Amino acid sequence: MLREGLLVVVATCVALAAATSPPQSENIEELLKNVDARYSDNVFEDARLNVPDLIRKYRYPVEVHEVTTDDGYILQMHRIPHGRDAHNVPNVKRPVVFLMHGMLSSSADLVIMGPGSALAYILAEEGYDVWMGNARGNYYSRRHIRLNPDAILSTAFWRFSWEEIGMIDLPNMIDYALKVSGQERLHYIGHSQGTTSFFVFGAMRPEYNAKIISMHALAPNAFMAHNRNPFLKVLSRYADNMESIASLVGFGEFLPKSEAFAWAGQALCRDEVIFQPICSNIMFLIGGWNEDQHNTTMIPAIMGHAPAGASVRQLVHYAQGINDKGFRRYDQGSRISNYRKYGSFRPPSFDLSKITTPVFLHYSDKDPMAHVEDVDRLFRELGRAIGKFRISLSSFNHLDFIYAIDAKTLLYDRVINLMKAMDIHGLAGIADVKGIEEMEGFEDHV
Ligand SMILES: *[C@@H]1O[C@H](CO)[C@@H](O)[C@H](O)[C@H]1NC(C)=O
């Protein structure tokens, strides 16, 4: 108990002590010379570069777009409009895929493992126009037309959870991507919180389901009743008080992207340093980590970009789900404030049956964040769950969906096959996808 409490305190201190400063990328021209690596050619450089410069370094086309949400948050999106080695003719209209990162992460997740390994590059090579979102409050979307994220006396900027990310950020970013690309519909791939926010989006803004061709949930998170993440489990005990304590001490932000982490990543987590196993364990604590599938050489690069910041409420909302065992709107903390906001003493459940987008769930046996039983329940309650796929490697963990050495062969190839089949033949096409017999729920739909 004491040890667990200490954990929360330590994480909090790190968050408070950390000061954000922009990454250095003045020498980008230097870096652009002769880089054509399949993997990262220099993990320390990759730790320092911001996402657009990182993409430029590996000679992929990149565009930076800014979207102002209906409630004033300024979000940065990163686009890879076409491939580098294949499908590389510019200005061709391509099918659009929208990628959404998990909690405490950013679009960096989708490129950090480098060409040939990271999902965004693989999709671009396969002929997709790749758009990557950044949720309000993370390193790239830490701006508002009026509110100040660093205000000393007010946490107004941080008064959101993944509910607002789903209800406001996703519709604004998706509309924008469709407008610029000239497409009417797109595919959606989310990881972890990127799936939670989608389920909120599809349930609360059901008119948007028609704009989504298919949704792929990597490590799906909606129900948290069986969550075994040690960190969230501890937090769930303090869920009722956490936000009020946090706002008393004047912070609404949790683990912003910081030089402290980047430094630790480079000084302590590089190859040949005895601390490297400890770094694996810090990552494990936050997101789950798999010795067999993690490339330890990449830790400094990953820690240069993650954690990238989130609001305290994002964590609290998950903690509420662990306590409450449902998938509900944010609990305002008292019956009366719930009543004022929702017209009921308890926050209403998200109505998953309203999600009519064809959804594919990709999960694993050992993911403590997306437990098999919670995934099953989600599958049953979704309006149009087409099937679920269990990753064939049982040790596959929550962060492996993004960082695993074999993520491409174990997961991404299948996602892409499903998307391509749907692009050509719609849902009828998936019957012919290679390995489709491994899909649970297959018999019900074909
Ligand atoms: C691990 O990452 C390094 C640096 O990007 C790369 O050179 C190496 O090939 C990777 N190892 C595996 C097994 O993917």
Image (cartoon, rainbow, N blue to C red):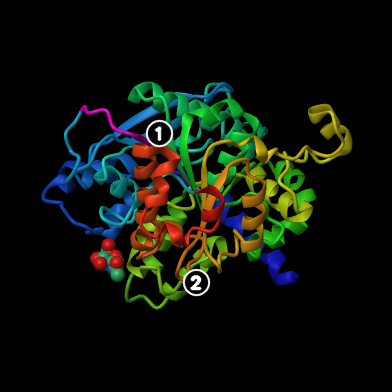
Q: Residue at x 28, y 46 (%)?
A: 54
Q: Is residue 98 magenta?
A: yes
Q: Is residue 75 magenta?
A: no
Q: Amino acid at mark 1?
A: Met
Q: In the rendered image, which quarter contains the N terminus?
A: bottom right
Q: Residue at x 22, y 28 (%)?
A: 92
Label placed on residue 77: 1
* 1 or 2: tag closer to the N-terminus: 1
Up/down of 368 relative to 444, above or below:
below
| Residue 10 image offset from top left, x and y in percent | 62, 61
Q: Secondary structure at mark 1?
A: strand
Instruction: Compare residues 104 and 381 and report the one nearer the observer.
Output: 381
- Determine whether, in the image, residue 392 is placed left or right of residue 83: right
Up/down of 134 relative to 175, above or below:
below
| Residue 389 image offset from top left, x and y in percent | 49, 58
Q: Secondary structure at mark 2?
A: loop
Label placed on residue 394: 2
Instruction: Compare residues 203 and 336 and report the one nearer the observer.
Output: 203
Q: Amino acid at mark 2?
A: Ser
Q: Which residues are magenta?
A: 91-101
Instruction: Compare residues 205 and 405 and report the one nearer the observer.
Output: 205
| Residue 277 image offset from top left, x and y in percent | 45, 75
Q: Nearer the viewer, mark 1 or mark 2?
A: 2
Up/down of 224 relative to 314, above or below:
below
Q: How many marks?
A: 2
